[in-house]
Image (tube, grey):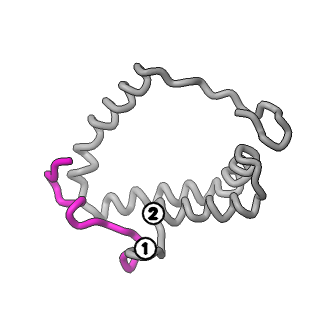
Amino acid sequence: MVEPATGQVMAEVPRAGAQDVDAAVARAKAAFGAWRDMAPPDRAAMLRRLADRLEESLEELARLEARNAGKPISDSRGEMGMVVRRSGRGPWPGAGRRGLLVCADCARPGRER
């Protein structure tokens, strides 16, 4: 990854090949059944924990995104705040009283995708 403002390499990231993608898809498919069958309040709790972890790292993530995209840190902070809100907190349009958007149909156990 090259920082646009300086042209300096800020990180090296391995490229994923077709086998890597296939393995990731297989793991996601294997995990989906447990997620699908989980009660919506339990899913919500997991998403809130994710939001907590993201919020703890918000400043670091914002700095990295600012460097990666060559944008002002204030823009990156706003974007990372949105990521936290969308990851398990609200409010946003359509969110429930606790700030979580839960699609009743999507949360129904046994629903096929």
Residue sitting farthest toward the left: 110
Q: Nearer the viewer, residue 21 or 98?
A: 21
- Of mark 1 and mark 2, the one earlier in the sequence is 2
In the rendered image of this protein, does residue 88 appear above or below residue 53?
below
In the rendered image of this protein, does residue 15 appear above or below residue 86?
above
Residue 37 position within the rendered picture, expressed as x and y whole percent measured from the top left: 20, 52
Q: Nearer the viewer, residue 42 or 69?
A: 69
> Which residue has dot 2 on it?
88
Residue drawn at x 69%, y 49% is 65
Left or right of residue 100: residue 105: left
Residue 69 position within the rendered picture, expressed as x and y whole percent measured from the top left: 71, 47
Mark 2 burial class by Cα count in 10 Å: few <14, some 14-19, many 20+: many
Amino acid beneath label 2: Gly
Residue drawn at x 23%, y 60% is 107
> Which residue has dot 1 on it?
99
Left or right of residue 69: residue 46: left
In the rendered image of this protein, does residue 15 appear above or below residue 94?
above
C-beta proximity under 8 Å, tags 1 and 2: yes
Q: Main secondary structure of the magenta part?
A: loop
In the rendered image of this protein, does residue 52 appear above or below residue 15?
below
Q: Residue 77 occupies which quadrant of the picture?
A: bottom right
